[in-house]
Each structure stands twice: as structure tokens, then as C-alpha cells.
Image: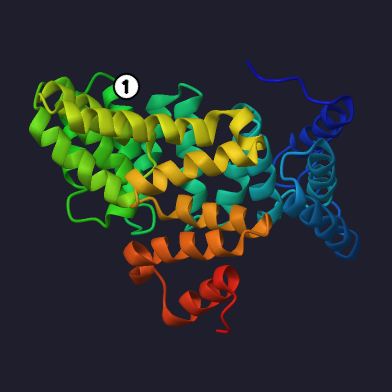
Amino acid sequence: MSRPRPPLVSALLALVLGLGACGDGATEGGSTAAPVDQAAFEQARNAAFRLFDQSPAHPKTIEALLAAYALDPDAYGVNVRLGQAYAEQKLHAEALPYFERAYAERPDDSATLLQIVTLLVRLDRAEEALVRVDGLLGDEKTRGAGLYQKAYILDTLGRRDEALAALEQADGLPFDDAYRALSLHGRFLQEDGRFAEAESLFERALAGRPDYKETLKGLADCNRRLGHEEEARHWDEVLGLVLDLTDNEYIRKQRDVRKEKLERLAQIHPMWGEGQLELADLHRRDGETVAACAAFERWLTTHASERDADELAALRARYCGDSP
């Protein structure tokens, strides 16, 4: 169920939708809309973008974006941000029209098309999503996500064989682009009792996204079904720590507890480099310079190849105080 909008946001949205109801800038009488007041629009847009950078889904941000939209309903950047602001609040029906307008302005923008497909799926409009999803497959930046969405949609429609065929096309894609597709493929094989094959897919997915919860759960389940109890307990613990760190509001606010969880995760799941750097940052903010440098050095042993020399020097200066 959508959350209620603040009264001022609702009023502005009604005004905006009323302005756009005639379509393509034309009034009911057929005359074209007044030219955009460019100076006023740029002032409104810049103010809205500053608010968006600070707090994307705040009511005042949305009010400011709607004010800019009222001055120029075709402005790509305004429409994209309005879509993002509503989507962040899980107001999917409200977000979709703005992404559609942005995509109409830039039909080669596959990232916005991915947002549209995702929202259609969340709105249970699977058939419409399926019509649009192939537009994602020709762009290498969205091909992995597109194959995941296509397979998910096909499976939702009861077409598992076609879904599997789509997922097989993810073979050969970089793991960080294809981790969702690989994990979904693993789940399908797991449901079919093919646990060893599923485990292999989950391991590849984990290489692309080491904190992806669906993958961690799949690895624990497959190892348990294969009789590998020690490995299953390992992945259960990793999953529990990731859930605590991402979903537990108390742990988000309790820095000492968070550091303990991150420290344990660094010990048993070092492939999640982001967690190790977060741990280094928490130590640094608390003035624990030795611990911050130690956390960075531990990250360095397994993740140095992910950054170039200048980035590594800057990180060392940040956490260990050495000059770059």
C-alpha cells in the first residue's frame, strides 16, 4: 500500500498532472504551451537538485522537483530525479510516469529503461515488462540486469523453461554484472534438486556481489543438502552478519556493536571488501588510528587489485596517515 503524501506534495502533484494532462505541451484548445521561462526553470532546477543531493526523498525535495517540473515537464534530469525520489519511498505507481517521460526524451538511456522494467514488475504488470525488457539486452551496461529481469518475469508468467534459457545467456558476462542472474539460475537448479550445479552458480554470483543475501542463503542451503554441514554453518553465520549490518536498525546506530560485527565478518568473509573499508572508517572516526590502518592493511591483502596505484595511495593516506 502506498504511503500518504504530505498535503503540499499532493497539491503540487495534482497541479503538475493537470498541466500535463493534455499531452505534448498542448492545451485542450489545441494551442501550444507557453515557452519555457528558462531563467526561472534553471533557478528552480538548481535549487531542487541541491536538495536532492542532500536528501532525495524528503518532502521538500519532491516539492522543489515538482516546481521545476511544472516549468518544464520534459526536463530529463528533473524527471529522472522525481522517479528516483518516489521509487525510494516505494511509491512505484507515482515514480513510473516520470521515468517514462525521461526515457521519451532519451530513448537510448538503458539505465532509465531498467528502472521502468523494474517498476512494472513491482506493479505486477509482468506482460508489459516483458515487452520492454529486451531493450536492455543490447547494452552491455544493462545486459546482466536485463537477463535477470527477463528470467524473473518469464518465471512469474509460468514459463520456467524460457526463463532458464534466458539465464544461460548470462554465461560469460562479468560476475559483477550478472550476479543476480547467476543467483536466480542457482535457485532454479536448487529447486530442481541439482544442488552441486546450483552451488557452483552461487559461488560465481558471490564473486560479483559478496554481500548478496539470496546468494548467501543459497550457498548455505545447498551445502546443507549436500551434507557439508561445516560449510553450511559458515554461510549461515555470514548471512546472519550481513542481515544484522544491513537490516537491523539498532546495529546501524550502535557503532561499537557494528564494529564487532564487521570485525567478525572480515575474519570469516574477507571477500566482502566494502565491509572492511567501513570498519577502517569507523575506527578512523573514533580516533583509533592503529586499528584503522590494520583494517586497511587486511583489506589490501585481498583487494589491492581492484584499485589503481593512485587510489591505493590515497586510501593508505586516509587510513594510515602516509603521504600519497
Q: Quadrant of residue 318?
A: bottom right
Q: Position of residue 210 (x, y in %)?
A: 35, 46
Height in image: 223 above or below 85? above
Q: Nearer the viewer, residue 100 or 229?
A: 229
The type of residue carrying mark 1 is Thr
Looking at this view, name the residue that lies furthest to the bottom. Answer: 323
Q: Residue at x 52, y 35 (%)?
A: 246
Residue on which the image places disc 1: 156
Residue 22 appears in the rendering: yes
279 with respect to 52 (left or right): left
Q: Residue at x 66, y 20 (%)?
A: 2
Q: Residue at x 35, y 51 (%)?
A: 270
Q: Quadrant of the N terminus?
A: top right
Q: In which quarter of the image is the C terminus?
A: bottom right
Height in image: 271 above or below 16? below
Tell me the crowding category of disc 1: few under 14, some 14 to 19, or many 20 or more residues within 10 angstroms, Cα based.
some
Q: Position of residue 117 (x, y in %)?
A: 45, 37
Q: Residue at x 75, y 47 (%)?
A: 25
Q: Where is residue 155 in the image (x, y as percent from the top left)?
A: 27, 24
Q: Where is residue 157 in the image (x, y as percent from the top left)?
A: 30, 20
Q: Which colour scheme is used?
A: rainbow
2 with respect to 14 (left or right): left
